[in-house]
Amino acid sequence: MADTTFRLRVRYGKTGRLRFLSHLEVVHGLERAARRAGLPYAVTKGFSPHMKISFGPALPVGTAGLGEYLDVWLRSYVASEDALALLVGASADGLAPEAVRYVPDREASLGAILTIAKYDVVLEGGPALPEGLRSSFAAIIAEGVLAVEHKGKQKIFELASTLPKEPVVSTDGGRTTVGLTVRIGERGSLRPEALVTAALTREALDGRIASVTRTELLVEEDGSWRAPL
């Protein structure tokens, strides 16, 4: 790898049918797009050199993302607008970049700085669903903890720190949307569908999850949140 590299941050989406890709498939797809775009990407050192690229927190299969991030290191400078145009032209619909910007190489990794995730969970159900969800969320949060089983293991989430904002329930055209803000980190994060399912089960509510979308990933610093790009 060259001694001097340029760290290009890319915001992209994972939408439509491509929301069913696994994280590894997303990684491979975006790496191929960078190669097709002809970007002068840097490679790692060692016995198995590969593109120097890093990604933000993975999305589960089936969950869409409107503001996902990756960093790719370039051997030579390419104007931001040119790099974006090249990447857009080389990317599949549903996995296309939306914005790029160079960031200092000394900045911590995306996995370290992205600690806030916002989600929209859309549900279908009867007219009593919105008010039932509000009541159920209030009761769950008042208890302070939520136990979630995943792959045969139980994890306990302290909701005071896990949920920096209370869920927001809204309705539009017969559908109910739950807006959730979740704190994420190295130890994992609370999946939004787990909290919504717990709320549905608690009150035996008539509703089912139709879609889950991660709308934003944010950096938390000095008591406020900001976009990483």
Image (spheres, rainbow, N blue to C red):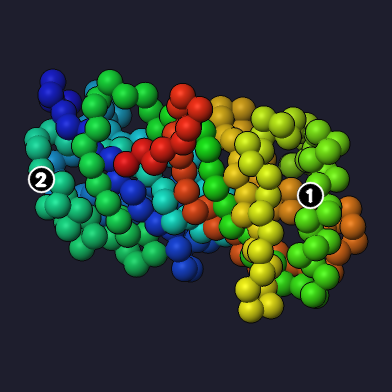
> In percent of the image, x 80 and y 34: which residue is there?
145
> As drawn, is 190 to the left or to the right of 27?
right
Which mark is nearer the camera, 1 or 2?
Answer: 1
**Number of residues whose C-alpha sits closer than 10 Å to that of mark 2, classed few (under 14), some (14–19) or many (20 or more):** few
> As drawn, is 11 to the left or to the right of 165?
left
Q: Secondary structure at mark 2?
A: loop
Q: Secondary structure at mark 1?
A: helix
Measured Cα–Cα span from mark 1 to mark 2:
47 Å
Report which residue position mark 1 lands on.
Answer: 137
- Image position, residue 24 (x, y; %): 46, 47
* 228 w.r.t. 36: above or below: above
> In percent of the image, x 30 and y 56: which residue is there?
98
Task: Give the residue type at disc 1.
Answer: Phe
- Work out whether residue 96 or residue 165 is closer to the camera in this orientation and state it: 165
Instruction: Say if mark 1 contacts mark 2, CB within 8 Å.
Output: no
- Image position, residue 181 (x, y; %): 60, 44
Task: Give the residue type at disc 2.
Answer: Ala
Report which residue position mark 2 lands on.
Answer: 79
Residue 185 placement: quadrant: top right
- Image position, residue 41 (x, y; %): 18, 39
- Image position, residue 151 (x, y; %): 74, 42
